[in-house]
Image (cartoon, rainbow, N blue to C red):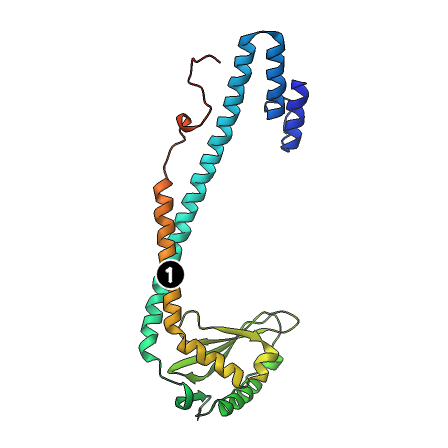
Amino acid sequence: MERKAKFINQILRGKLDSREIEGIGDAALGAAEMKAITSGNLLLLEKAEADNDYQRLQRLERAHHRAQTVLAATRQQASSRIDNAENELYLLRQALPRTTDVSGDNFVMTVGNNRYTTRAEAGQALTEWAANSGAKWLSAYENRRLGTLGEIAGHTIDAGAAPGLNQQPFITLTLRDIPHSSIQLGRDSFLEGGAGLIRQLEHRATGIPRSIETVEQAKQEAQTAIREAEARLGQSFNTSTSSGTRKPGSTP
């Protein structure tokens, strides 16, 4: 029963890499313990229990090393997120003072070389600009810069195309040098333009303070992740903290 249990355990773990079977699973250990008990030989029982402890500690040690690897990766990824967040915060804080008020009747937008003071007019101009941008003839797999669309709330709007879905590319509108300001939409939606798209661009510009808060929070979370990882990194596997482990030389 013990030999069969070892073989079955190896199959279940997917490790038939040799003719010799070395692994001992819980079922095999149970059979070994039954063999030791029925034999009346206490040394066999102690050997079975020692094998049980050994296998359990091996599993715990492997889990410990995996956890250390994950912690090191977590620290590295969090450090990269902090670097990205600091760069984004710099750009956002530089952009904030340049932002002008376009709410209500203060609305002003430039499309191409023309200035508009109503969203309806700006939306119509955006539709015409999209039609003249060549976006209608773009391949679904093409990357292309479509040019400078205009300006809103003191920020330049850049337009570009990227590979998309359903045989049409994605069009991306971005406020230049402002992280988290991109709007991505299908080509057909871009060609329709309209005041709705103008509103989205307006919200990207007026949403810079919220973007700063979001990035600052992400930076704080990354810093917390680093502190938590470093508190556990470098810890050695300690068998004395493993419950149920007998001290060497002890008897059952």
Q: Which residue is drawn at the image coordinates 43% and 13% (left, top)?
A: 250
Measured as percent of width and height from the top left, residue 45 is found at: 55, 13
Packing grade of label 1 (10 A; few <14, some 14-19, many >=20) is few
Measured as percent of width and height from the top left, residue 122 is found at: 49, 89
Does residue 131 appear to the left or right of 178 in the view shown? Answer: right
Asked if 5 appears above or below 225 in the picture, the reply is above
Residue 148 vs residue 214, the one in the foreground? 214
Most extreme residue toward the top is: 40
Measured as percent of width and height from the top left, residue 222 is found at: 38, 54
Asked if 103 appears above or below 96 in the picture, the reply is below
**Residue 30 placement: quadrant:** top right
Q: Secondary structure at mark 1?
A: helix
Q: Which residue is drawn at the image coordinates 34% and 75% (left, top)?
A: 95
Asked if 102 appears above or below 235 in the picture, the reply is below
Q: Which residue is drawn at the image coordinates 36% and 68% (left, top)?
A: 212
Does residue 219 appear to the left or right of 31 in the view shown? Answer: left
Asked if 211 appears above or below 226 in the picture, the reply is below
Residue 162 vs residue 249, the one in the foreground? 249
Residue 155 vs residue 240, the one in the foreground? 240
User: Does residue 196 appear in this view?
Assistant: yes
Q: How many labels, in total?
A: 1
Residue type at mark 1: give it: Gln
Quarter that holds the N terminus: top right
User: Does residue 147 appear in this view?
Assistant: no
Measured as percent of width and height from the top left, residue 197 is found at: 52, 81
What residue is pinned by disc 1?
A: 217
